[in-house]
Amino acid sequence: MSSTLKVSTSPLPGSRIALEVGVPGSRCQASYEAALLKLGRTVKLAGFRQGKVPRSVLLQQIGPLRVKATALEELVDAVLRDALSQENLEALGQPELSGGFDTLLEQFEPGKELLLKLEMDVPPTPKLKTTKGLKAEAQEVLYNPERIDELLEQSRKQLATLVPISDRAAAMGDVAVVSFSGSFSDTNEPISGGSAESLEVELEEGRMIPGFVEGIVGLKLGAETEVNCEFPSDYQDETCRGRAAKFKISLNDLKAKELPTLDDAFAQQASDKETLEELRAELETRLKADAEKRQKQNREQALLMALVAELEVEIPESLVKEEINAMLQETAAEMAQQGLDIKKLFTPEVVRNLASKSRPEATERLQSSLALQALAKAEAISVDAAVLEAKMKEVIRGLSDTNRIDQNRLRAAVSEDLLKEAVFAWLEANASITIVGAEKPAESPKSKAKPKAKAKAID
């Protein structure tokens, strides 16, 4: 039936189109008859076998409006699919009926031609004003040799022996065992989750909310104190954000950290290296690699910003909403991995606020992706099939359970990554980048010393 549809389209702002479809009267009649048959199979009436209710009785029982509504729902869905296929169009999100369903229902008459008017988002068509000769500025990232000593010191703290202290007050760097209870300063209401018995706290800045650790410093064993604190404005529990609080704290136990000597024995305990010299060399290699990686990321980001500045595109609202939703799901997944209660934290109000705040970043992400797609198309940049296959085999070899992997999705993801690499390589060759003022020396989470079970402190 799709060949009999009269279809016309007209562009609208925001990567949308208006679609008008003339539906033949014969198709309207067929949809009405199909709806009658469908409803007739489901209606049960005393004195009639199911599915054998006469047409006149059925119409009297359920009413002609219900039949027309059922017919129209099926008709709109089917006609829309056929019209999109006939015109080779792709709709993003849910198309909208101009005037609404009720208005269309009033116009619907079996056997008579029906004019459907819809509006819908369609995939944007990104274009670049220019591709070659772009100019970009990237911050320089320097390798900082002082980071080696910092990492070694972190590992010493991780491998420290805790020694009981009884002859002095608590000091920064100690480990205190405290009991405490907290309440809000303005209402004296107890803070949910704001109390504990015998909690071990490392006396370091940033371990607790501002003012808490500082209140413990100076206490002696068995002493009690009351400290005034204020929850940060971005605290994870929204009921506490920015509110002043007071905590009654008692010091139950106190321990000092006895750091291991920085020697070969420490290197063997902290890593898989035999000597301290080997460990230092390993850290130097890692930090230099991190600096190079950060420098590469800075160059790519600078090139991407220069490319986006040349982008001409209207991004449909449905794509923005889809990107925002993806970002919220990423945030929820990260919080869940930290053991946080997502259902409790993600209230409707929090979700709305997060969605609103995420909109600018979502738009930027879409612009970046569309700019790269436009460049790949404009300069005919593609991924060689042999390269893709080789990369697929490499990735699959690194997977532990290949039976649960969707091969098509994996191939699409690998292909996208390879294409992005090829696009950035093209940009590097066809744009000029100026390296400016050194960025703060590289410090990557992967370069930090971290526990390896209890035996190794540097992984």
Image (tube, grey):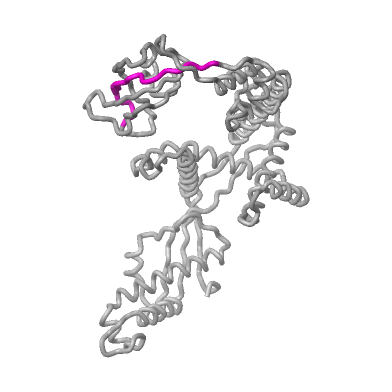
Residue at (51%, 49%) from the top-left corner?
A: 15
Start and end of the magenta stretch?
Answer: 240-258
Magenta segment's dominant SS is strand
- Residue 258 horizontal/vertical position (percent): 54, 16
Q: Is residue 375 magenta?
A: no
The percent position of residue 263, horizontal first and vertical second, equals 67, 16
Across the whole image, how many numbered discs are drawn on residues?
0
Q: Give residue 440's quadrant in the image.
A: top right
Observer able to see residue 283: yes
Residue 115, image x, y percentages: 42, 68
319 lies above or below 34: above
Residue at the image point whose x is 33% and y is 16% from the top: 222
Query: In the displayed structure, would residue 434 be above or below residue 388?
Result: above
Res 356 quadrant in image? top left
Image point (60%, 23%), residue name: 443
Residue 277: x, y in percent?
73, 18
State the residue in front, 55 or 198.
198
Q: Is residue 268 left or right of residue 123?
A: right
Quadrant in the picture for residue 62: bottom left
Q: Quadrant of the C terminus?
A: top right
- Given the current orientation, which residue lies at the most extreme left position? 187
User: Most extreme residue toward the top, as rendered?
Assistant: 168
Q: Is residue 38 left or right of residue 361?
A: left
